């Protein structure tokens, strides 16, 4: 039987109370992280989420130069001040860090896991919660993208796609082998816009994710896209949704890509829609680098990023008169308010809408005046 208070909760799984610890502070902290990792695994959190949280805790340890049982709220305040003033991190990132430290402190102060007792016995002190309402940022908005983030205008989007196509012709005309990845990325960007996809949703597409839409036979085998890697809620698997094809040109380019160009990749047999020359799926770095290069070459501002394809999809469908509920279902938003945040309608659209409403009101008033009494 394990003694010295180590029989409770996760402590007994990681520390042997009858054995002396060579580096007690480091070993207890490591055991804490192991226990916290198991707790998060039990909650079905993604491995990437857990790893990111552990890195945040280690970063705080390094900045404060103190182990968790000696943390204070003042240390958190100093860390946040450094992250804001020196590293200039975004507000959402800072709040995520605060949430991580709050979660870790909740775990090590929970009596059920026994860490407070262990620390008191070994170090003469115990951990406390260091994140409170009075020193934590409040999440008050559904979306916290930077104010510069926006959708493409129609002219910008056309210029971007034209530039992508020109690069394929230019590289191929020079006899360089890079035309194939350039062609892939041009098709990838157009598909992201055509279906309103997030970056990872685009990257993880497979050839078999497309199917026929009985109500849209003109799109052939590309009438509906089944998104299998949608944004997940915490502790849940990726959300799935179906996206109906709305642009006839998207079905045409996908057919050309799958039948004529994609088979040229040596990794095409793996089934990924966007293979790279060495792996099944193109990498995020390749996608981001190509996007940034094209954007900067055209002199477009930094407010445009890969997610701007999704913003543009929502905006342009709304401007073209598509039903707002339909657009919401297409992009997989749970709440209509989230879709509205993505909508960046142009001033011309708002002017036309206002003019139409005013003309309708005036016509109705004139009709009432002419009506015989």
Image (spheres, grey):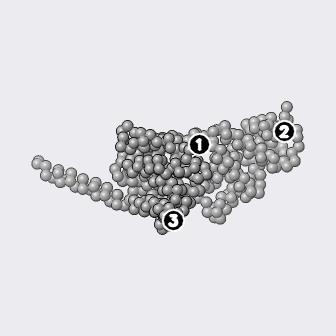
> Image point 60% across, 49% down: which residue?
279
The residue pinned by badge 2 equals 16
Whole-percent x, y for residue 155 in the image: 39, 62
Dot 2 falls on a residue whose secondary structure is loop
Q: Tell me which label, 2 or 1, sits earlier in the chain.
A: 2
Q: CA distance from mark 3 to mark 1?
A: 48 Å
Quickly name the residue at label 3: 174
Q: Nearer the viewer, residue 147 or 178?
A: 178
The answer to whether 358 appears left or right of 221 in the picture is left
What residue is shown at x 36% (from left), y 39% (from top)?
A: 215
Badge 3 marks a residue whose secondary structure is loop
Find residue 164 and report its horizontal and vertical position in percent. Answer: 47, 60
Q: How far apart are the alpha carbons under marks 2 and 3?
A: 67 Å
Pointer 3 local density, CA inside 10 Å: few below 14, some 14–19, many at least 20: few
* Residue 344 at x, y percent in the picture: 42, 56
User: Which is closer to the viewer, label 2 or label 3?
Assistant: 3
Q: Secondary structure at mark 1?
A: loop
Q: Earlier in the sequence, mark 2 or mark 3?
A: 2
According to the picture, the residue beneath numbered tag 1 turns out to be 234
The N terminus lies in quadrant: top right
Q: Position of residue 354 (x, y in %)?
A: 31, 57
């Amino acid at each position: 039987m394990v003694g010295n208070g180590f029989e409770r909760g996760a402590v007994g799984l990681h520390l042997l109370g009858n054995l002396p610890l060579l580096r007690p502070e480091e070993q207890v902290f490591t055991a804490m992280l192991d226990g916290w990792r198991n707790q998060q695994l039990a909650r079905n959190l993604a491995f990437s989420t857990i790893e990111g949280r552990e890195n945040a805790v280690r970063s705080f340890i390094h900045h404060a130069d103190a182990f968790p049982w000696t943390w204070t709220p003042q240390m958190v305040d100093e860390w946040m001040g450094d992250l804001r003033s020196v590293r200039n991190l975004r507000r959402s990132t800072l709040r995520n860090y605060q949430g991580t430290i709050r979660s870790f402190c909740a775990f090590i102060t929970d009596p059920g896991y026994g860490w407070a007792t262990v620390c008191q016995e070994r170090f003469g002190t115990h951990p406390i919660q260091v994140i409170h309402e009075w020193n934590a940022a409040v999440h008050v908005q559904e979306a916290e993208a930077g104010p510069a983030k926006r959708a493409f205008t129609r002219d910008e989007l056309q210029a971007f796609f034209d530039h992508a196509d020109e690069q394929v012709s230019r590289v191929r005309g020079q006899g360089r082998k890079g035309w194939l990845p350039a062609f892939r990325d041009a098709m990838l960007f157009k598909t992201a816009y055509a279906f309103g996809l997030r970056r990872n949703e685009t990257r993880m597409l497979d050839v078999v994710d497309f199917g026929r839409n009985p109500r849209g036979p003109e799109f052939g085998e590309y009438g509906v896209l089944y998104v299998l890697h949608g944004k997940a809620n915490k502790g849940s698997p990726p959300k799935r949704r179906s996206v109906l094809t709305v642009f006839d040109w998207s079905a045409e380019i996908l057919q050309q890509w799958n039948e004529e160009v994609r088979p040229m990749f040596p990794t095409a047999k793996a089934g990924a829609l966007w293979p790279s020359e060495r792996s099944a799926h193109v990498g995020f770095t390749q996608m981001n680098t190509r996007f940034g290069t094209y954007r900067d070459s055209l002199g477009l501002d930094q407010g445009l990023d890969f997610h701007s394809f999704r913003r543009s999809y929502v905006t342009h469908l709304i401007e073209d008169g598509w039903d707002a509920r339909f657009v919401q279902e297409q992009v997989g938003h749970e709440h209509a308010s989230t879709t509205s945040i993505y909508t960046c309608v142009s001033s011309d659209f708002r002017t036309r809408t206002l003019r139409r409403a005013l003309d309708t009101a005036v016509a109705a008033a004139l009709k009432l005046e002419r009506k015989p009494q």
